[in-house]
Image (tube, helix red, strand yellow):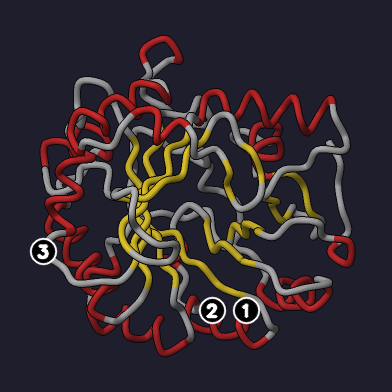
């Protein structure tokens, strides 16, 4: 696995695990270790200041909103010339006042997980918490603050099979310019609920979208170009074929099981192909994201 110094960062996107604390206990969690101390922000800012160019910084964790200084982290990421993106379970984002604090700090892009969409039975099965109301309030707050929403949904066979259609029905209640719905299957990392042979596949997800939303399978299958990289295990396409880039609803489908395999092969066997995303390590270096997560499973 190739490791980089911050001054030589080759990635357009970096994930920073600002905390390992969380206010949920989902059945699927790639980073379930809760004993790691919070990231030192002064060292983080020193690290960010060394990056050679503007980088998308994905603020992840377990749950980043557990940090009281999250608005300061967002502000300083922007101040240092980078673009902050928050990935959250959305529970604390159900507070309009809190979301405004994040927006005032400079946050524009916000990803929330909505594995159960608007169905508490689904949330209880996948996330072990009936939280549909809070999730919908969080989505509403993000959109009403003119932030750009991304919705993440883990597809679990026999549980939330109609999630694509229900997400579109939910979004029809809001007015916004752009939203990405990110569907993925259960990744066999950390704590997970399904083994590989029980999982939905990328093809399964594409067929569900064709059936529920009338987006042709062949149209989806042509959409392997993700930010300039050809990714066999992902698809990115607009809901309507006539949608213009930067406008409307887009879907991104990812096969985590195969992406993890592809990532390990890329990172451990082929030192030249690095992919799109990196992860900040404990010792303030940069590693390929999936490879580093896998090699530090149940650790960092």
Question: Dot 3: within a 10 Å radius of its alpha carbon, few (fewer than 14), some, or many (20 or more) residues?
Answer: few
> Toward which corner of the image does residue 2 lie, by quadrant?
top right
- Residue at the spot x=55%, y=38% of the render? 224
The image shows residue 143 at horizontal and vertical percentages of: 26, 73
Q: CA distance from mark 2 to mark 1?
A: 5 Å
Query: For mark 1, what is the residue?
Result: 77
| Residue at 23% over, 38% down | 128
Residue indicated by mark 2: 74
Of the two numbered discs 2 and 3 in the rendering, the one whose residue sits closer to the viewer: 3
- Residue 112 in view (yes/no): no
Disc sitting over residue 296 in the figure: none
Q: Nearer the viewer, mark 1 or mark 3?
A: 3
Residue beneath the point at 89% across and 61% down: 8
Q: Nearer the viewer, residue 258 or 76?
A: 258
Up-down relation of residue 193 to residue 12 (above or below): above
Pick the front one: 98 or 226: 226
List x then y, in percent, for residue 60: 52, 58
């Amino acid at each position: 696995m190739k490791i980089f110094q911050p001054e030589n960062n080759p990635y357009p996107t970096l994930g920073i695990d600002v905390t390992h604390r969380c206010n949920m206990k989902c059945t699927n969690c790639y980073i379930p270790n809760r004993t790691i101390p919070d990231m030192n922000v002064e060292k983080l800012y020193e690290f960010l200041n060394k990056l050679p160019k503007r980088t998308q910084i994905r603020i992840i964790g377990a749950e980043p909103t557990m940090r009281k200084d999250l608005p300061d982290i967002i502000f300083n990421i922007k101040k240092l010339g980078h673009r902050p993106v928050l990935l959250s379970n959305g529970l604390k984002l159900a507070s309009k006042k809190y979301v405004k604090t994040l927006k005032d700090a400079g946050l524009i892009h916000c990803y929330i997980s909505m594995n159960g969409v608007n169905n508490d039975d689904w949330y209880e099965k996948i996330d072990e918490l009936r939280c549909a109301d809070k999730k919908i309030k969080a989505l509403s707050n993000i959109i009403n603050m003119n932030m750009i929403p991304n919705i993440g949904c883990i597809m679990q066979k026999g549980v939330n099979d109609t999630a694509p259609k229900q997400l579109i029905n939910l979004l029809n209640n809001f007015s916004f310019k752009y939203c990405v719905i990110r569907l993925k299957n259960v990744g066999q990392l950390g704590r997970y609920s399904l083994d590989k042979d029980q999982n939905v596949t990328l093809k399964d997800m594409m067929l569900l979208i064709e059936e529920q939303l009338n987006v042709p399978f062949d149209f989806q299958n042509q959409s392997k170009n993700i930010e300039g990289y050809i990714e066999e295990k992902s698809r990115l396409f607009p809901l309507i074929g006539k949608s213009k880039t930067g406008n409307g609803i887009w879907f991104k489908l990812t096969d985590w099981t195969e992406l993890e395999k592809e990532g390990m092969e890329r990172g451990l066997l082929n030192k030249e192909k690095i992919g799109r995303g990196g992860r900040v390590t404990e010792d303030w270096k940069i590693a390929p994201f999936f490879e580093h997560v896998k090699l530090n499973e149940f650790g960092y």
